[in-house]
Image (cartoon, helix red, strand yellow):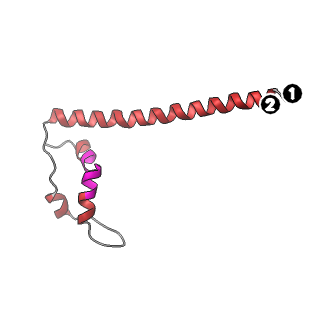
Amino acid sequence: MVVPEFLVWFLNLQQTKEILRKETVGSAMPSITKEMLEELDIPFLPLKTQLLIIRLAFLDKKQISLKSQIHNLKQKLSNQVINSLIYKNHD
């Protein structure tokens, strides 16, 4: 059994995308055929391992999102401090 979220994660791996990109058909709108997906070597890992991978992928995305939010908040705070220093001196 393959968990759908694991399959999505696997299909979005850079290595998997490169394999599929080499096999795509069509020039204007490249597409992947059913046969290409059937021939793809999808690892059948134990359910526990699939769930662990899904969880790790989720946490990785969450970490990236939080780092971005922290960066934005620091930038906003920095701008507020700088603006208050600039405009405080002009009063």
The one nearer the camera, 22 or 54, is 22
Residue 31 occupies quadrant: bottom left
Q: Are marks 2 and 1 in contact (CB under 8 Å)?
A: yes
Q: Position of residue 2 (x, y in %)?
A: 17, 43
On the image, numbered disc 2 is attached to which residue?
A: 87
Q: Position of residue 27 (x, y in %)?
A: 33, 73
SS for tag 1? loop
Measure the C-alpha gap from mark 2 to mark 1. 7 Å
Viewport quadrant of the N terminus: top left
- In the image, is residue 28 above or below residue 7? below
- Total marks shown come to 2
Viewport quadrant of the C terminus: top right
- Inspect the image, locate mark 1, and give the three-letter code of the amino acid beneath it: Asp
Q: Which numbered circle lies on residue 17?
A: none
| Magenta stretch holds residue 14 | yes
On the image, numbered disc 1 is attached to which residue?
A: 91
33 left or right of 30?
left
- Inspect the image, locate mark 2, and give the three-letter code of the amino acid beneath it: Tyr
SS for tag 2? helix
Residue at 23% across, 47% down:
7
- Which SS does the magenta portion mostly show? helix
- In the image, is residue 87 above or below residue 32? above
The residue lying furthest to the bottom in this view is 27
Magenta segment range? 8-18
79 left or right of 34?
right
26 left or right of 83?
left
71 left or right of 1?
right
The residue carrying pointer 1 sits among few (fewer than 14), some (14 to 19) or many (20 or more) residues within 10 Å by Cα, namely: few
Residue at 57% across, 31% down:
73
Residue at 75% across, 27% down:
85
